Image (cartoon, grey):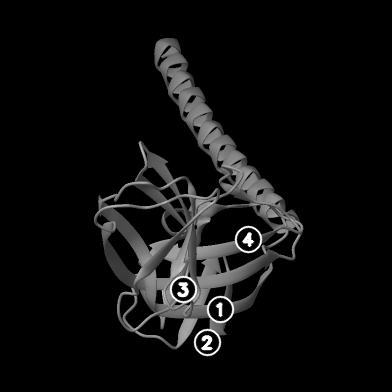
Amino acid sequence: MGASVGIGGLIVGVSMLVVFSMAYQSIALQIDSGLDRIENADEPLPTFTMDDAELWEGAVVDITINSGGSGYSDGTFEADPPTGGLFGTYTTSGGAIDDVVITSHGNYSSAPTLKFNCNVPCTPSGPAPTYTIELGNVIYANLTNTGSTTISHDDMWLFVDGVNATSFSDAFTSPIASELWFSGETLSLQWMNADVVGSNRLTLTAGTMTVSHTLA
């Protein structure tokens, strides 16, 4: 009889320990969940503005030098005639143009002719340089972080007319090699070869915040 009572008591004791353990785990989970909600509530939501937005559907997005001519020195280039807004710089090797950097992409209905201007007097000779110009879409926008939080570029998404979500990191190249958008900072977006289906509205989303601007 005594043995039976002892075993029964042991079983009851073990059962109580299991109940207490389950109760403790439940309370601990509730506390953790509550702390998470408090922490999230204390973190301010991101806020930002899209100050302007513009789509250039005939921008010069790439220039390939096929043959560089001869007799050139390093200099600048522009469209000839000088309309549309294309400008850039070029470098030479042995008097031949070997590389170009576009500083303003311009906007054209067809590929423009280029005029090369040497920085120091030069006398080009022989055949003129030949090149291939690629036109494409470029979206320009200025964005300002008006909130108190720092936003990762990986948490930001771009849309044109609500479709084709594109990671901000894929569309924006930071001039300071940063992947963070700091409070008070204005980013100048230059989205090259933008995957554009529509042409009416640019939208930026980060977290629960969304802003849009009509494309000029």
C-alpha separation, residue under disc 4 versus residue under disc 2: 18 Å
Q: What's under tag 4, amino acid-wise?
A: Leu
Residue 67 pos. (x, y %): 24, 51
Residue 53 — which label? 1
Q: Are marks 1 and 3 in contact (CB under 8 Å)?
A: no
Q: Is residue 63 placed above or below 142 in the rendered structure?
A: above
Of the numbered discs 4 and 2, the one sitting upstream in the chain is 4
- Name the residue tied to disc 2: 216
Q: Amino acid at mark 2?
A: Ala
Rendered image quadrant of residue 136: bottom left
Q: CA distance from mark 1 to mark 3?
A: 16 Å
> As drawn, is 18 to the left or to the right of 59?
right
Tag 4 near tag 2, CB within 8 Å: no
Element type where label 3 sits in the image:
loop
Could you tell me which secondary element the residue under label 2 belongs to? loop
> Mark 1 is on which residue type?
Ala
